[in-house]
Amino acid sequence: MSNSYTIIISPAAQEDVYNIYRYIAFELKTDIAAQRLYDRIISMIDSLEKMPERHPLVDWEPWKSLNIRKVPVENFMIFYSVNISEHIVSILRIFYGGQNVEELIDYSKDY
């Protein structure tokens, strides 16, 4: 049995990455910084293929009970779940760390 996990990125997380890139590249007009941040986010997501449980669980409900984990990348936070039995990591959302994430999440759609 392989120790590698398959990574699945939700449509919401894909949109989050796109919006982060677009904002930095076009609103702040720093396309090099946008590409570097995008590369760091993707690299962190790819690293979850091995030992995805190394990052902490969130500390608020209902995501804590759902075993949702978080990992920072610069000023952003990647939220994901781990299905141990199927060896799947699901990337749920990526938010700016200064946002009140609990208020942003639509629990009916985001998990």
Image (cartoon, rainbow, N blue to C red):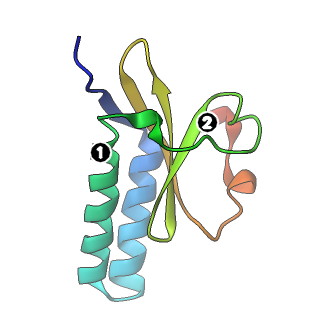
Q: Is residue 53 left or right of residue 44?
A: right
> Helix, strand, or loop for circle 2?
helix
* Residue shown at 35% from the left, 33% from the top: 8
- Identified by mark 1, the residue type is Ser
Whether residue 73 is visible to the viewer of this picture, yes or no, is: yes
Name the one closer to the observer, 51 or 29. Answer: 51
Name the one closer to the observer, 94 or 27. Answer: 94
Residue 26 against residue 68 in the figure, above or below: below
**Residue, disc 2:** 109
Q: Is residue 64 left or right of residue 24?
A: right
| Residues packed near mark 1 inside 10 Å, few (<14), some (14 to 19) or many (20 plus) | few
**Residue, disc 1:** 47
Residue farthest to the bottom, as pictured: 29
Instruction: Give the percent coordinates (x, y) of residue 100.
Output: 71, 62
Residue 84 against residue 27 in the figure, above or below: above
The label shown at residue 61 is none
Instruction: Give the percent coordinates (x, y) of residue 67.
Output: 61, 30
Residue 83 against residue 109 in the figure, above or below: above
| Residues packed near mark 2 inside 10 Å, few (<14), some (14 to 19) or many (20 plus) | few
- Identified by mark 2, the residue type is Lys
* Residue shown at 31% from the left, 75% from the top: 34
Residues marked 1 and 2 touching at CB (< 8 Å): no
Instruction: Give the percent coordinates (x, y) of residue 80.
Output: 49, 39
Task: Determine which quarter of the picture holds residue 57.
Answer: top right
Whether residue 111 is visible to the viewer of this picture, yes or no, is: no
Instruction: Give the percent coordinates (x, y) of residue 6.
Output: 29, 27
* Residue shown at 66% from the left, 67% from the top: 99
* Residue shown at 30% from the left, 35% from the top: 50
Name the one closer to the observer, 64 or 1. Answer: 1
The quadrant of the image that shows the C terminus is top right
Number of labels in the image equals 2
